[in-house]
Amino acid sequence: MSYETKRLIEIRQGVLSKNDQLAAELRSRFHAAGVTVINLLSSPGAGKTSLLEATMRVMLAECRVAALVGDLATDNDARRLARSGGLVRQIQTGDMCHLEADIVARHLADWDLSQIDLLFIENVGNLVCPAGYDLGEAARVVLLSTTEGEDKPLKYPATFATADAVLLTKMDLAGPVGFDRAMAEENIRAVNPLAPIIATSARSETGLQEWMAWLREQMQARAKGSKTIA
Amino acid sequence: MHELSIAYNIVNIATRAAQEAGAEQISAVHIRIGALAGVVADALRFSFAIAAEGTPLANAELIIEEVPVVVFCPNCRTEVTLPNPRLFRCPSCHRPCGQIVHGRELELVALETL
């Protein structure tokens, strides 16, 4: 062995290639079943669950909505969301700060995807780690609440740059907390010039119509996509 | 803090590759991290040292190449490198560019044996 000389072993493989492969499998399953999947990302307490409650209440009247809800611990969010009447399941990640494709696959193993039109995956509240993990979603939506400060997009560019839409949440608190909406939008635009920005409040129901119109567009785009392929 | 789980992924992939190549000891691990990969290099180095214990990668050096953000500029019709990952504007025409071409990489490139 001492004769062995220094050499290079080429690998050239994505460190998360296993997750990417599982996510690609999930994406084709979702596509085949006609489910539009939305991955929701934000910091803890930005209002993902409140937004989902308000969204599911309305969307359930027109389509079949389900949600997978990721948290480090407790099933409080799932219990809150279940009141809407949709299919809801809690994912408790323990110490994991993000969801991965295999966790998602395991938690929907016994669901009949053909009975779902719109599936929300509420990621663990965290603006760093979830950004690197594809879950097979059709679109990634990032929330920024008025109480967090306008510079979050500049502090977490990886998450905001890869968003397909950005929602400003808790707009009913914008006045009391002195939220500068123009600056927040400018910061979002700096790292993501393409994503639509929708200002919402789950409490006052501001902007929810616009948000749901965007969701319907995503669902229609899926439906058209499947027809073309079939 | 997901660097530890990323470090374990690196160690698992690299250990398998080392075994397949018949290498008993790895002296260096080359990886590429995009500016938008959401991975902190220092945290990864720290985690890697822990994850590598008791494997052929123990004491190996983690050599990190940082990959800048490259976007497609629809105006210039070309790929451009962003000098600042917090400003998605074409450095030559200054128009906003949002189509990411590079910068999300998290790649295990190669191993060096002793």
Image (spheres, rainbow, N blue to C red):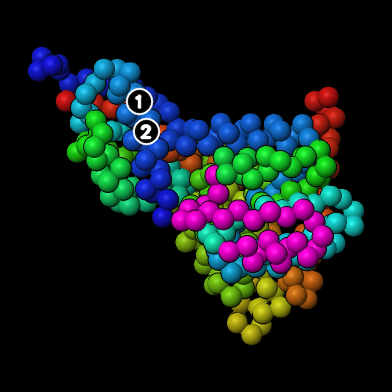
Q: Is residue B63 magenta?
A: no
- Is residue A84 one of those drawn in magenta? yes
Q: Position of residue B1 (x, y in %)?
A: 41, 55
Q: Is A210 above or below relative to B69?
A: below
Residue A124 in which image quadrant: bottom right
Image coordinates of residue A200 in percent, x first then y, are 73, 68
Find numbered disc 1 in the image and state the secondary structure of the residue it sits on: helix
Q: Which mark is residue B16?
A: 1
Per the rendering, the mark at residue A199 is none
Amino acid beneath label 1: Arg
Please name whichever residue, A43 or B12, is drawn nearer the observer in this view of the structure. B12
Q: Quadrant of the N terminus of chain A?
A: top left
Residue A211: where, in percent of width, then height?
77, 59
Relative placement, left or right, of A73 versus A77 is: left
> At 63% across and 31% down in the image, what residue appears?
A25
Magenta segment boundaries in residue numbering: A74-100
Residue type marked 2: Asn
Residue at 66%, 83% in the rendered image? A175
Between A178 and A136, the residue placed more toward the observer is A136
